[in-house]
Amino acid sequence: MRLFRRRPALPAGSRPPLEAEERVVAWSACEQGVVVATNRGIWPPGGDRLGWHEIHKAAWSGRELRITPAEVAEERDGYTVLVDGPALTFLLLEPGELPDQVRSRVTRSVAYTTHHELEDGAVRVVGRRVSGRDGLTWAVRYDSGTPVDRESVITATDELVGAARNSVVPPP
């Protein structure tokens, strides 16, 4: 009787082009090929790696893994404005540890998050850890209907991000 069940190794032909410090933590076959999770992010079948810090949402239905990546809408001084990208959906044939690894790694990438009401709309300020880098990267995501180009909204957002940065790492 085997006390520990070992998952079969990732087939060599399904191994993505990993960086030197990158290692596979979980994988699953799906209808489109193989989804591979590493310490740096998730590799969809035939695609480029999506870093854990680049994922807005991840949901597991018990059969289907749905990932909503973040897309850069605008670069501002000291932070990025993000929007939801097209969702990626994978019907996992043998999910194993993949859904748990995705959820825990996306969650661990978030070091700071707050939601703020603005004069017109609202914004979420997020500081995230990026695997292989020191410090946090800062981003905002506006609620639907917020006038993101309005000067008062930009000024308020700049102040909110600045306050968030200072609360995590006080100025020297």
Image: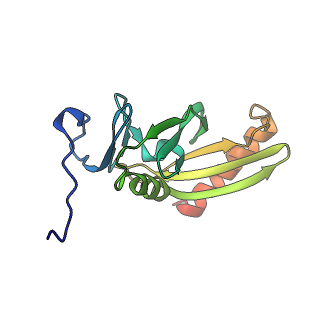
Q: Position of residue 132 (x, y in %)?
A: 33, 49
Colour scheme of the rendered structure: rainbow
Where's residue 34, x and y in %?
32, 37
Q: Residue at x 22, y 54 (%)?
A: 7
- Kindly indicate the quadrant of the structure image that contains residue 44: top left
Q: Is residue 7 something one can see in this rendering? A: yes
If the image is split into quadrants, where does the N terminus sit? bottom left
Q: Is residue 170 visible?
A: no
Tell which residue pokes out farthest to the right in this image: 119
Tally the marks.
Answer: 0
Q: In the displayed orientation, state which residue is furthest to the left.
A: 1
In this rendering, the answer to whether 105 lies above or below 53 is below
The structure residue drawn at horizontal position 34% and vertical position 54%, both measured from the top left corner, is: 96
Report whether 120 appears left or right of 55: right
Position of residue 52 measured from the top left corner of the image (x, y, whole percent): 43, 47
Q: Between residues 116 and 13, which one lies in front from this camera angle? A: 13
Classify residue 4 by image quadrant: bottom left
Q: In the image, residue 151 lies at what x, y percent?
A: 79, 35
Which residue shows up at 66% across the image and 57% down it? 114
Q: 35 or 145, which is in the foreground?
A: 35
Nearest the eye: 29 or 141? 29
User: Horizontally, is 159 left or right of 128 in the view?
Assistant: right
In percent of the image, x 37 and y 44: which residue is there? 93
Residue toward you, 48 or 134: 48
Q: Which residue extends farthest front?
A: 1
